[in-house]
Image: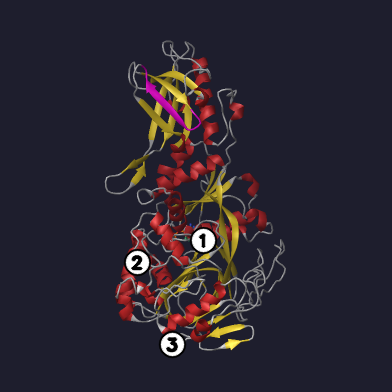
Amino acid sequence: MAGHRHSPTDGITAPQVILEDDFAAFRRGNLRYTVRLTPEAIVYVVLGSKQERTLALADVLGCHTSVSLRRKPTQENQTAFLCIYSYPLKRKLLSGSARNRVSTSFRVDRFDNYEQNCELAEKWRVAVRCLLAGQTVTAETELTPSLLPSQPTLLVLLNPFSGQGKAKQYFDDQVMPMMAEADVSITLVTTEHSGHAFDVVQTADLSSWGGIVVVSGDGLLYEVVNGLMSRPDWEQAIKIPLGILPAGSGNGVCCSINYALGEPFEEDRMFHSTFVLLKATMKGQTRPLDLMSVDTASQRRYAFLSFQWGFSADVDIESERYRYLGGSRFLFGSLHNLMKFRVYRGKLSFLPVKGVDALKQARQVLSKNKYEVKPRSLSHSSSAVAINSGRDDARMRTRSASAMNGFHYVSTDNETLETPSQESTSLDAQLMSFSTENGVHHTKSEEDHVNGKLTTDGVVGTMDSEDIHYKNGDSDFIGAAVSTNQNNSKSSQPCTAGAKRPHRVYGPSSTLLPPLDQPVPDDWVTIDTDFVTMIIQSISHISEGYFSSPCSSFGDGVLFLSFLKRGVTRRQMLKIMGKMADGTEVFEYGSDGGYVCCKAFRVEPVSPPGLMTLDGEKIEYGPVQAQVHHGMMNLIMPND
Ligand SMILES: Nc1ncnc2c1ncn2[C@@H]1O[C@H](COP(=O)(O)OP(=O)(O)OP(=O)(O)O)[C@@H](O)[C@H]1O
């Protein structure tokens, strides 16, 4: 039985090789391999040939010795086994790429003795597991089981009614086998009613688990987050790594994770998301995720995904009855709502982020994604936001470069790059003022645009038809904004989040938000109009097929706000929905919408009661405001 331990002086690859042995193929007669373990891969070469195969460790989930092969040693056969589970990406003919499971087994037969072969196989297992956990292993490392990283136990909360009601089936058939391969142990709780997960995490001793994973739609994660934030030790509790496996019909978080990582999602989303989650779990990796503190008249909640009002909220909630269709329910719901095509009167106010040109960033992201991007004269644009305020349908219909679909861009050097309507000129001139560094800055031409309404501490500009106001105060946009609680420090005591918040809740102070019944600070932008839809989100996808914010990334500390106003037509809506689905130019809302970057927002509906959602869950209809809290949560996902 051949084989040898690698010596660092062997060959040119010597410094890279951690282990090298000759093993027999599992089921292929006399075929033998030289197998090498490097920090990046397991490479095996057929003895006597140059036929080399590589299992990249980035694709490997686990490694087991003979245990999994269910073979007992006999007198004649003293062989041990080594089995490696990998999930390499394969290109698909029509649909990009997808991972597939490959299990590679070797017969470890260097010795005539079963125990010694087992010991050798175990050395390999220890080395591979250590590398998968991100530990450094070299040819000199003494490979004993004591080196094995301790794998945390995960609390898994499974909603059997998520999506099409297949969460349990997915979990048993796909997730559990992969968890076993990765040696991840779990405590499984199947939720029995709405609020169950909230109760579990609100009272649990969290030190028992290394993380909490929901197998559900985004709604159960929302429940878990709010459960954690309702604990007296919320500040520590919310730091527990949180993961999600997509069993809902929306799955915005999983979609955003896989998009950010360049991982496939469309085909077998549970399989791909489990792979991603386990890779991160094994290395103890997380990424920060922002949390929104959201106040309504009666309550404070926490959200990590989106606030929606209008068309998209209606689609989300009203399509619940088509749940059996899975993700297609949104398409069905969209078509249904397109027929009604309602508008919603209200006021949208937001605190813009200085120096972020959301549209320009979106274009960069999309072109990096190799999507076809139409030429636009944006090269000098660096205004804080870009908003379309015109309502010129003729201009909307003309997709010429000069019309730019109604978008109007301004630059810090006051160069107007488009010929906007009078209305958009007015708004953009106002926006230009907060893109300057030190408070108010107006050129003569800008002042002309804002209809001459100058005040001593800034400017109030009004638009004839849309009643859009911009007020510029003296204060810097963060920190000095009006707040109910000027103490910026986080409190572990219950805090009231504003004058209209009768429910005492735990959580951070919303330093950017005034009480809900008080006016917004001067440095906020207000748009008072008829809206068709409004989505405010912190990650890229609000659900599958809704890549509505190309600029959003995990833990960026900002929100992106997309809206459409009265004036957009059904045809345009259809087109926008199509673009959202294939991830191209989702921000191209024509002259009747906008895509902006903000830190806080307030929505004050005037329309009769309708639907508003937070992370896809219905909330009470009425005034609502929120601010983003940078990276408060830890989302289980790879970060290298
Ligand atoms: N056993 C249960 N019975 C009824 N409701 C439950 C149960 N477990 C959880 N819930 C509730 O179901 C709601 C939705 O859960 P979840 O997000 O997992 O699925 P979903 O709404 O189907 O997902 P999606 O919106 O993506 O379709 C949550 O608010 C949660 O409180």
- Cα gap from disc 3 to disc 1, whole angstroms: 45 Å
| Residue extent of the magenta highlight | 38-47
Mark 3 touches mark 2? (CB < 8 Å) = no
Q: Is mark 1 within 8 Å of ligand 1?
A: yes
Residue 296, by quadrant, is bottom right
Question: The residue under label 3 is which amino acid type?
Answer: Ser
Residue 213 image position (x, y, % from top left): 52, 49
Residue 551 image position (x, y, % from top left): 47, 61
Q: Earlier in the sequence, mark 1 or mark 2?
A: 1
Residue 395 image position (x, y, % from top left): 33, 78
Mark 3 touches mark 1? (CB < 8 Å) = no
Q: Earlier in the sequence, mark 3 or mark 2?
A: 3
Q: Is residue 189 magenta?
A: no
Residue named by callout 1:
194
Give neighbour class at mark 3: few <14, some 14-19, many 20+ (Cα, 10 Å): few
Q: Main secondary structure of the magenta part?
A: strand
